[in-house]
Image (cartoon, rainbow, N blue to C red):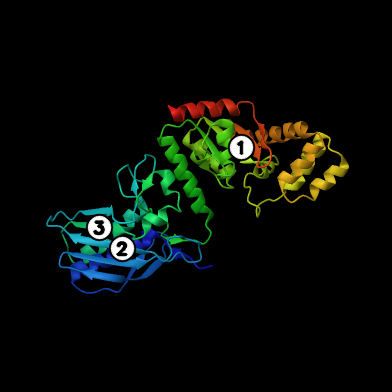
Amino acid sequence: MRYGFTTGSCSAAAAKAAAYMLLSGKRKENIVITTPKGIDFFAEIVDISREENCVRCGVVKDGGDDPDITTGSVVYATVRKQNSEEGNLFIDGGEGVGRVTKPGLDQPVGNAAINSVPRQMIEKEVREVMELFDCNNSLDITISVPGGEELAEKTFNPRLGIVGGISILGTSGIVEPMSNQALLDTIQVELNQKKALGYDTIVIAPGNYGLDFMKREYGYNLDEAVKCSNFIGETLDMIAKLGFSGVVFCGHIGKLIKVSGGIMNTHSREADCRMELMVFAALKAGVSMEDLKLISECVTTDAAYEIIRNSGKETEFMDYVMGQVDYYLKKRAGGRFEIESILFSNEYGLLGETSKARERMEELTRYEEG
């Protein structure tokens, strides 16, 4: 599959080209930068605007075969020459680039959401040009992405407190198709922010599935939870490293039934043994052989649970499942923090919770309201 280049690489390439045109007085329609990954980016420069002390140009973002919402957007850099001869570079965001309003992110509150590695890339490439032309002037560099504010609504930025646009991102400079690392990086950012905001206990959930249920049952807005996707084990390891003392894991039976079998990455391509685990738990609960066969033929866990419920063995079934979920989550936590869990169904609502889950949710709700 074809890799692409990050918004950070596009910013650095546009800034390098703009600086070259500003200091040389010559038009530049192609530029090369070297990404932190060591791969060269041969960028075509578009929409060039030149003035005596200012040049603006863009690079079209190409995410390769990754389903990247910023693909096709133009990342612009505007480079202005200052009268100062101190040789400083000032990097900021313009139209369509978000601004940080909450602590715990890569940049401090008030800064443009241009992360550290892209800033380093921009500075490296522009300084190469300054050295080439023996430039001592200080330069202002403004990165902008027209349409970025609308694109940001489809990202995690609003929930992270980044307003007004997208973030300029990338640690390697390239976009690898369907990268799990990108998801893990997002989880890490959310956890960092919770820690910076003073949280000691947090809720993690695979997604917003169960939003209404959590609001109704616990008075908690599940949108505030850290979304761990399928990466349950790796998220728990991140939580331990950051020093949280308490976690509540909230999930649909379709996810947590896998955890009851010790599965810590619940993506179907990693493990899809929901019905096998449902059948085994039902067997332990004393469900009849006839019903076990029916469960094994079910497509969804909700349908399987309905059979168990109709058998009158739902209490025994859930006691076993929650005991297993609790065991494996605590095993992964390894005593580094306390963890409780909540299991629900779309059809039947709350199915099970560990002994201190409700107490932890009440504490968390009071903290957020206070």
Three-letter amino acid code at disc 2?
A: Tyr
Q: Secondary structure at mark 3?
A: strand
Give how far across and how far down residue 56 sits, in percent: 25, 65
The secondary structure type at the circle numbered 2 is strand
The CA span between labels 2 and 1 is: 45 Å
Q: Left or right: where does residue 35 sit relative to residue 21? A: right
CA distance for labels 2 and 3? 10 Å
The C terminus, quarter of image: top left
Which residue is the site of mark 2? Answer: 76
State which tag comes first along the sequence, 1 or 3: 3
Mark 2 or mark 3: name the one nearer the start of the chain: 2
| Residue 243 versus residue 162 in the image, above or below | above
What amino acid is at disc 1?
Arg
Q: Quadrant of residue 316?
A: top right
Q: Label for residue 189?
A: none
Q: Which residue is mark 3?
A: 141
Q: Residues within 10 Å of mark 2 (few under 14, many from 20)?
A: many
How crowded is the residue under tag 1: few (<14 C-alpha within 10 Å), some, or many (20+)? some
Q: Which residue is mark 1?
A: 332
Question: Between residues 162 and 189, which one lies in front from this camera angle?
Answer: 162
